[in-house]
Image: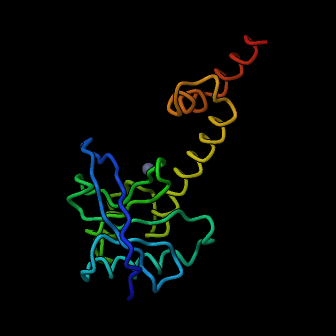
Amino acid sequence: MDFLSKKQEFIFRNSKDAIVRVHVMQVGSTPYDIWIEGKMKKYRDCVTLLEKALVDFDRSDLPPIIVVANKKIETGGISSYNHVDDVIYFNSFYHTQERIDHVIDEGTFAAQDLSGIIRHELGHKLHWDAVKRFYRAHKSKYNNIEEAKHDLDAPVGELCSKSIQSR
Ligand SMILES: [Zn+2]
């Protein structure tokens, strides 16, 4: 497995609300956009598992996948979509099929396999992509994207009555 040597820094807020910095390198020997925090076997095994799961997808639909250490994510979650950088974080703790099967058995994702988990994260991405388009189209109405998201996520009935009122 070769690695493209230039490291990139990503910063995110983890599930315990701590600001975390990771330095990752891109995996060169894969058709997918996968970045890893280290060269240890667990990272390479994650890449292999991800490659198997990603064959079902159109590559252009996938954001970069950033494989990071469990201690950075904190709560032991397997994956998370980050809308600021438009990336999926993947926890390197899940570097064996057994560990992935275990998290699937727990049923948090309603997924059958790792492809299902990635599809779940892509659902979050599609949602945020819609929020970003909505925010760009209505920028003067909102102070920030979270406010725009709040309106977009409001029940349809509420949105309808609002647009009637504004006429
Ligand atoms: Zn989710």
Quarter that holds the C terminus: top right
Residue that lies at the very extreme toward the front in this rendered image: 6
In the rendering, at what x and y percent does residue 143 appear? 53, 25
Q: Closer to the camera, 7 or 149?
A: 7
Horizontal and vertical percent for residue 51? 47, 79
155 left or right of 137 in image: left
Q: Is residue 49 above or below residue 100?
A: below
Residue 23 coordinates in the image, percent (x, y): 31, 64
103 in relation to 133, above or below: below
Q: Residue at x 48, y 64 (%)?
A: 118
- Residue 44 image-quadrant placement: bottom left
Q: Quadrant of the N terminus?
A: bottom left
Above or below 94: residue 75 = above
Question: Please, which colouring scheme is shown?
Answer: rainbow
Residue at 55% across / 53% down in the picture?
Answer: 123
Q: Quadrant of residue 128?
A: top right
- In the rendered image of this protein, does residue 97 appear above or below residue 108? below
